[in-house]
Image: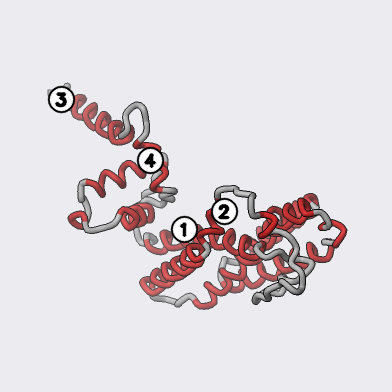
Amino acid sequence: MEDLVCRLEAALSAAISALGESQSEDAAFYYHAVLLARKAMLILRRYTTAEMLQAIPSQINYFKKLKPRLYNRFIYFVTFYSIECERPIGNKDHQLAYYRSKKEALGNFIEQHREFYRYYRSGQTYLDEVYFVLCSREKFLPVVDFHAEPGFSSSHDYLLAKIQAYEQVIAVLDRKFRKLRFCDRKIQLKWTASQAAFVELVYAFHCCGVFNHGGITIRELARELSEFFQTEPGDLYRLFQDCRFRKKDRTKFLSFLSKGLLQHMDGLDAYK
């Protein structure tokens, strides 16, 4: 089954790449991408037999690791098809507001399922026999999805694939948002230092009230600066804790900036 999923993934990626070469990523592109991903899911369904899923470990592996690899691609394309169909045309500010609202809605969905999200992201396994085994017809709760069916579904493989897809959609929406927001700039600034360095700078700005007289949250500041510098802020709290618990030089990047500026000043002084 692993080999089949790998082959279907490769075939889907090749077909999507070929599709992208012939047209831009608009509603028409995502419509055809949905059809391609749907075909891959139907093939997976056709070759999934009851014999393959007799043992509990096989069911967990299938519903937690194998099926979501294709399922999340299907959901990803369906989601973007809907987003592009409804996207406002023309006005830049309206499009920016639209992308931000969609990103927030997807983030809210993940937040609503935060317990399961934490379970998935932290690599836990203690509830796998609850989440990722076959649903019987009596226990099966119908969802609005033609793939969710007894014999091919567990209680949470759909939710897992949906969260994975939404994570990818949010990341792409971030890039689309930045590209649209800064498309008129003559010079594009891209952050090329590390994420830890970025977090150091963000926290320094926030602690010193550099922007809006301090009237902005750390997350708002990180979001705005990450959009401007075309980077991903990462896990702010974790990266900050990494800096905080360094044994040497807890503000390594700020020290690097200070040292570089002082060296430049000293170099200029030498020419006096």
Residue furthest left as drawn: 272
Secondary element under disc 1, as helix, strand or loop, is helix
Which kind of residue does numbered mark 2 sit on? Answer: Tyr
Which kind of residue does numbered mark 3 sit on? Answer: Asp
Secondary element under disc 3, as helix, strand or loop, is helix
* Residue at the disc numbered 4: 241
Which mark sits nearer the N-terminus, 2 or 4?
Answer: 2
Task: Give coordinates of residue 43: x percent, y percent.
Answer: 80, 64
Crowding around mark 3 (Cα neighbors within 10 Å: few <14, some 14 to 19, many 20+) is few
The answer to whether the residue labelled 3 contacts the one labelled 4, judged by CB atoms less than 8 Å apart, is no
The mark closer to the camera, 1 or 3, is 1
| Image point (41%, 59%), residue name | 178
Tell me which corner region of the image, top left, top right, bottom left or bottom right, holds residue 153: bottom right
Crowding around mark 1 (Cα neighbors within 10 Å: few <14, some 14 to 19, many 20+) is some
Task: Give coordinates of residue 131: x percent, y percent.
Answer: 66, 60
* Residue at the disc numbered 3: 269
* Residue at the disc numbered 1: 175
Task: Give coordinates of residue 134: x percent, y percent.
Answer: 75, 63
| Image point (50%, 61%), residue name | 170
Which mark sits nearer the N-terminus, 3 or 4?
Answer: 4
Which mark sits nearer the N-terminus, 2 or 3?
Answer: 2
* Residue at the disc numbered 2: 119
Rendered view: 208 above or below 102? above
Q: CA distance from mark 2 to mark 3?
A: 58 Å
Which kind of residue does numbered mark 4 sit on? Answer: Gln
Task: Give coordinates of residue 20: x percent, y percent.
Answer: 62, 62
